[in-house]
């Protein structure tokens, strides 16, 4: 067998060095890049939220002025929703989807690299706004008319809209890549009813992105046309209507919240069976529920707009849709609980985070159902009750699973185990800190404290809750830092993880930790939903060719299989490292800065450069299959 | 002996000294070039079209939303409803461009290079004519009456037709690329995902025009 590995080595090795840093197309390196770039944005967004909390510690503080406060909460929301959550979940997806489905790479490796560089470029673009003190300052959903030229004459809003248009290229490219990879690259025998739930979660996320994101892009383009060229989409003077922005934004925004939690739910459904030592109960229902959530997310958009004034009939319809989404969510919930109760749970750190998640999501779900009733929503809109609910859903629903995933998967990615004791400590500090920070916001919200206001008067009964909340936020931050320290220490002096430290069921554990560049010595034939539990040969090294493994040693190759039942269809020659994705991104950045500063010659130059970049990218080099 | 393909040529000697390839008959029976739904590229294009469809849906939905926010008069501010002759001629030209493109695709599936080149070239000329008419004949005429900054109607008119026009332009560039590749003989009966993807994209741009035509030109006249 060693000879197979030697041959694969020759074709798959990327020479270490600076050039490869920019040129790599390896989904594992890109996954790592997504992960740590996303986490850096998490830290930045977290620092901003600490500024917010510090400012609100007690009444009438003057740590920051109102304008800074506006920029802080706007960039906090925008960073967390766009530059942190999806990129980190895409990072895990990039790294683990190909491994879980037994492929050697994503379907479009260069597009994958491009997606990463554009994400980085768009993030830096938006953050460069701080250099001129003009960060976006109109909240993460940026409503006109406030976001129009008249009330926001600076560049703040242009950074927001152009930055997000730039970013949408990355998100769309990434989503398409996930869909095609999941459709076409699964190992032979992995029919869709044998696909791991995490892969379903990423698929649901990607599909919802493809269908939801354009609505935001259109809104952003319209806004920039209004601002830069005097179009009239959102201003009533010229026959436009600011409510149009709200519709377009929430057609996108509501699915977006689900887009964030869907892969996170997938992580939960991956960790629970492993640590309950039994297969997931109700696999098929969980899968259907994931897809149903992705779908229903679209029907719920108007629930964000109950307080805008929409005719009564449609209000009650949407209200029903909001309630309905609790059915698929509830289904998953009970499947998780049933699996845990029916299994023999082992309380390792990843599992702790999952249990924490279940608890927090229950609270978030409950306050969400309260919103779904129209009169209640009208009372609490724009109070801290909303901030509390939102964070129970996104931090409870996505951040806790992500941290569980770090403890679960980092051993595969780095080859080193994290420290259990420190992991547990980190979990408990995060869990208690989180509840201290966000539970009191329910109360201060019901007492009427408005969101997005930089300070408040003493004596309204809000002081104590805000104080607790600030203490909790710092505690949460400390807990998060502990995990980062744990990660850092594990890389330096952690215990070796071995191929499969947890006794898991899915294919990523069948290869070495960290995996070789070609992932699998032989692409295995899969005969079960839990291949590692049901196919003993996979635990003993690469599946031999007699047992169904595909060595594919003729080049830089992987398999394409059929959509439903994963019958082998073709051997695909994959592209090598390429500088063009990064160069194309640089040209696009020039273009966006050109638009930002009304320097249209510069923008034209960037557009020309981008065309050149595309030609360079697709220039035939005789290595990839000519299509 | 299977030799390494181009990009790895430098490593071939290493391969010869290390190990022979181990290929099972299962592997060697698989094709190395596939097109249509068996290929990844085809699915990539399908997904791109899905997301683009949503883009145009959002634009057209915005058109109707703003139209019904306004009073009974549409177009507003005394603007005349668009004249139909020119747009209908442009429509005929654009839609007819799909025919040669369709036959080009059929031709290469049978390996016919000459017809492939001919069909692509014809489609290109028709598409370019459409764009030239939009920019050279239609816009000068409408701009004399109203501009994108006149009111929301103007913004919608130029943004939606402009978005479509940009898609035609991208399609033309895609066509150029495909034609260059075709002249180099890059396609044959097995390898033609690029041609298929171009064809699909081109048909898509034509189908979108149906909705643009109905919304922008026919609706205000109805
Ligand atoms: C690290 C812990 C976090 C803390 C302490 C925190 C704190 C806060 C606070 C205090 C606000 C309200 C600001 C105001 O309305 O005056 C806020 C808003 C918000 N947060 Fe967080 N947050 C945290 C994490 C997150 C995460 C992980 C996400 C998303 C994935 C997130 C998304 C948002 C959004 C979208 C808003 C609304 C921004 C706006 O009003 O435009 N936060 N956060």
Image (cartoon, coloured by chain):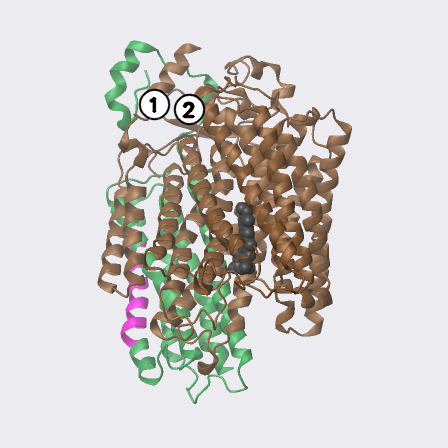
Chain colours: A brown, B green
Question: Residue A217's spot in the image, x, y percent?
Answer: 45, 60
Q: Is mark 2 within 8 Å of ligand 1?
A: no
Compared with A536, A141 (above or below) is below
Crowding near pointer 2: few (<14 within 10 Å), some, many (20+)?
many
Chain of the residue on which disc 2 is drawn:
A
Q: In the image, residue A315 lies at what x, y percent? A: 69, 68
Measured in 3D between alpha carbons, the distance from the residue under mark 2 to the one under mark 1, in whole angstroms, is 9 Å
Residue beneath the point at 52% across and 31% down: A186
Q: Is residue B75 something that shows in the picture?
A: yes
Q: Which residue is mark 2?
A: A518
Q: Is B196 located above or below residue A230 in the figure?
A: above
Which of the pair A271/A439 is nearer the observer? A439
Q: How far across and how far down the image is residue A210, in percent?
A: 50, 51
Which label was assigned to residue A11? 1
Residue A446, how many percent across, how many down? Answer: 69, 61
What residue is at 57 percent from the left and 57 percent from the top?
Answer: A58
- Mark earlier in primary sequence (2, 1): 1
Tell me whether the residue at label 2 lies in contact with that at label 1, contact meaning CB atoms closer than 8 angstroms. Answer: yes
Using the rendered view, name the quadrant where residue A230 is placed.
bottom left
Range covered by the magenta-colored residues: B118-137
Q: Quadrant of residue B68?
A: bottom right
Looking at the rendering, in which quadrant would you find the N terminus of chain A? Answer: top left
| A481 versus B87 height, above or below | above
């Amino acid at each position: 067998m060693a000879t197979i590995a030697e041959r694969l080595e020759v074709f798959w090795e990327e020479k270490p060095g600076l050039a490869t840093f920019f040129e790599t197309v390896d989904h594992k390196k890109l996954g790592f890049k997504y992960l740590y770039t996303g986490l850096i944005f998490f830290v930045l967004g977290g620092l901003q939220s600490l500024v917010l909390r510090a400012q609100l510690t007690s009444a009438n503080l003057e740590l920051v002025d109102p304008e800074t406060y506006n920029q802080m909460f706007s960039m906090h929301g925008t960073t967390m929703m766009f530059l942190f959550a999806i990129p980190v979940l895409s990072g895990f997806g990039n790294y683990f989807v190909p491994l879980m489905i037994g492929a050697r790479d994503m379907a479009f490796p260069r597009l994958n690299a491009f997606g990463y560089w554009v994400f980085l470029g768009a993030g830096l673009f938006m953050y460069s706004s701080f250099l001129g003190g003009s960060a976006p300052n109109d909240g993460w959903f940026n409503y006109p008319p406030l976001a129009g030229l008249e009330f926001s004459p600076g560049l703040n809003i242009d950074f927001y809209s152009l930055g997000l248009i730039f970013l949408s290229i990355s998100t769309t490219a990434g989503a398409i890549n996930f869909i095609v990879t999941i459709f076409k690259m699964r190992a032979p025998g992995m029919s869709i009813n044998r696909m791991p739930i995490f892969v379903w979660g990423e698929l649901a996320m990607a599909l919802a992105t493809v269908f939801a994101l354009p609505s935001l892009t259109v809104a952003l383009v319209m806004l920039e046309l209004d601002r830069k060229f005097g179009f009239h989409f959102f201003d009533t003077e010229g026959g436009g209507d600011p409510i149009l922005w709200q519709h377009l934004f929430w057609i996108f925004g509501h699915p977006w919240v689900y887009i964030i939690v869907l892969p996170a739910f997938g992580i939960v459904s991956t960790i629970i069976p492993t640590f309950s030592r039994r297969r997931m109960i109700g696999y098929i229902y969980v899968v259907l529920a994931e897809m149903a959530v992705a779908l229903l997310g679209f029907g719920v958009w108007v629930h964000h707009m109950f307080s805008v004034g929409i005719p009564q009939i449609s209000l009650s319809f949407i209200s029903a849709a909001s309630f309905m989404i609790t059915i698929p969510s509830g289904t998953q919930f009970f499947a998780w609980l049933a699996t845990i109760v029916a299994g023999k749970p082992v309380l390792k750190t990843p599992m702790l985070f999952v249990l924490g998640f279940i608890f927090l999501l229950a609270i978030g779900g409950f306050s969400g159902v309260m919103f779904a009733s129209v009169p209640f929503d009208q009372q609490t809109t724009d109070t801290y009750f909303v901030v509390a609910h939102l964070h129970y859903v996104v931090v409870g629903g996505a951040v806790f699973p992500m941290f569980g995933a770090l403890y679960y998967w980092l051993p595969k990615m780095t080859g080193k185990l994290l420290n259990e004791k420190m992991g547990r400590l980190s979990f408990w500090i995060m869990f208690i800190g989180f509840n201290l920070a966000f539970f009191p916001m329910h109360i201060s919200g019901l007492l009427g404290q408005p969101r997005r206001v930089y300070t408040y008067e003493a004596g309204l009964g809000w002081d104590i809750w805000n104080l607790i909340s600030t203490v909790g936020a710092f505690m949460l931050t400390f807990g998060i830092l502990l995990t980062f320290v744990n990660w850092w220490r594990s890389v330096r002096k952690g215990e070796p993880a071995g191929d499969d430290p947890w006794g898991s069921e899915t294919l990523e554990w069948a290869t070495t930790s960290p995996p070789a560049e070609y992932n699998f010595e032989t692409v295995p034939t899969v005969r079960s939903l839990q291949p590692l539990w049901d196919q003993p040969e996979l635990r003993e090294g690469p599946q031999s060719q007699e047992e169904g493994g595909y060595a594919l040693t003729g080049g830089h190759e992987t398999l394409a299989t059929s959509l439903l039942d994963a019958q082998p269809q073709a051997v695909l020659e994959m592209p090598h490292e390429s500088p063009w994705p990064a160069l194309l991104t640089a040209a696009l950045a020039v273009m966006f800065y050109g638009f930002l500063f009304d320097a249209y010659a510069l923008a034209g130059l960037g557009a020309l450069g981008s065309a050149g970049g595309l030609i360079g990218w697709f220039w035939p080099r005789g290595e990839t299959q000519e299509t | 002996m299977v030799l390494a393909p181009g990009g790895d040529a430098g490593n071939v000697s290493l391969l010869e000294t290390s190990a022979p390839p181990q290929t099972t008959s299962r592997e060697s029976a698989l094709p190395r070039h596939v097109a249509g739904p068996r290929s990844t590229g085809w699915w990539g294009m399908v997904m791109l079209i899905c997301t683009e469809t949503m883009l145009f849906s959002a634009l057209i939905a915005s058109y109707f939303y703003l139209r019904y926010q306004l009073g009974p008069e549409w177009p507003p501010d005394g603007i005349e409803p668009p004249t139909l002759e020119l747009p209908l001629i442009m429509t005929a030209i654009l839609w007819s461009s799909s025919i040669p493109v369709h036959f080009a695709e059929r031709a290469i599936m049978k390996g016919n290079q000459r017809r492939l080149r001919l069909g692509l070239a014809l489609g290109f000329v028709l598409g370019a004519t459409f764009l030239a008419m939009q920019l050279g004949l239609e816009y000068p005429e409408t701009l004399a009456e109203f501009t994108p900054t006149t009111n929301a109607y103007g913004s919608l008119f130029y943004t939606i037709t402009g978005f479509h026009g940009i898609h035609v332009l991208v399609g033309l560039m895609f066509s150029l690329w495909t034609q260059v590749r075709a002249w180099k003989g890059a396609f044959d009966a097995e390898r033609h995902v690029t041609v298929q993807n171009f064809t699909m994209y081109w048909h898509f741009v034509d189908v979108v025009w149906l909705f643009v035509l109905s919304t922008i030109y026919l609706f205000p006249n109805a």
